[in-house]
């Protein structure tokens, strides 16, 4: 919207270059720079002209990278790139990179998955754009095992894991059941996914 005014003591009429005779003009959807010219004529017949050029600033583009599917207690790392000179995230982060802990959200949980929504704002020369993304947070499995933990030397050890979908034992076994014949006290570490 452009508004023209005059300091004349008499009544002034205005004529814009498109023959609009209002004191104010409004142009929607301007896509390229444009110069507007207006003529002002007072009751005495005196005329003056004014010009105003409207510059166009492009809305900044945004691209997001990073993992949108993480396990709880891992770091959510999202990066925004594009034509903006400033970025701000919905959680208060004021850089192009968001780095925050993935906390399981019971309020949005469906089974072993919850979600967390983020919005990044991108600013360029007074123009703003935003992009939303949803991160899926997977609950860590509660794993355990069954089997004897005290055996005689040379006996067979068999431990069966539970609580996860995939298992990895510290001796290299990638199965639910660990079978071994330890010859000394041995510690086994179980990882479940």
Image (cartoon, rainbow, N blue to C red):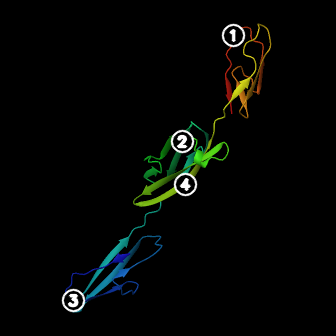
Binning the other alpha carbons within 10 Å of mark 3 as few (below 14), some (14 to 19) or many (20 upward) gives: few
Question: In the image, what residue occupies the spot 21% across and 89% down?
Answer: 10
| CA separation in Å, label 2 and label 1 | 41 Å
**Residue named by callout 2:** 77
**Residue named by callout 4:** 132
- The number of numbered discs placed on residues in the rendered structure image is 4
Question: In the image, what residue occupies the spot 73% across and 32% down?
Answer: 166
Binning the other alpha carbons within 10 Å of mark 1 as few (below 14), some (14 to 19) or many (20 upward) gives: few
Instruction: Identify whether 158 is placed above or below 79.
Output: above
Disc with the residue nearer the chain's start (2 vs 1): 2
Secondary structure of the residue carrying tag 3 is loop
| CA separation in Å, label 4 and label 1 | 53 Å
**Residue named by callout 3:** 10
| CA separation in Å, label 3 and label 2 | 64 Å
Look at the numbered discs 2 and 4 and tell me whether their residues touch, using CB distance below 8 Å. Answer: no
- x, y percent for residue 70: 61, 40
- x, y percent for residue 77: 54, 42
């Amino acid at each position: 919207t452009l508004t023209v005014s005059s300091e004349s003591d008499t009544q002034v009429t205005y004529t814009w270059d498109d023959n609009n005779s209002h004191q104010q003009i409004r142009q929607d959807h301007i896509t390229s720079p444009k110069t507007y010219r207006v003529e002002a004529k007072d009751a005495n017949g005196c005329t003056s002209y004014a010009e105003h050029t409207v510059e166009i600033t492009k809305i900044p583009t945004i691209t997001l990278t990073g993992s949108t599917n993480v396990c709880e207690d891992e770091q959510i790392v999202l990066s925004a790139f594009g034509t903006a000179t400033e970025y701000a995230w919905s959680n208060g982060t004021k850089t192009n990179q968001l780095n925050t802990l993935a906390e399981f959200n019971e309020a949005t949980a469906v089974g072993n998955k919850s979600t967390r929504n983020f919005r990044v704002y991108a600013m360029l020369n007074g123009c703003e754009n935003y992009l939303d993304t949803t991160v899926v947070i997977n609950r860590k499995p509660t794993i355990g095992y069954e089997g004897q933990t005290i055996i005689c030397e040379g006996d067979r050890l068999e431990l069966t894991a539970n609580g996860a979908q995939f298992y990895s034992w510290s001796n290299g076994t990638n199965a639910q059941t660990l079978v071994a014949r330890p010859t000394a006290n041995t510690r086994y570490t179980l990882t479940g996914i």
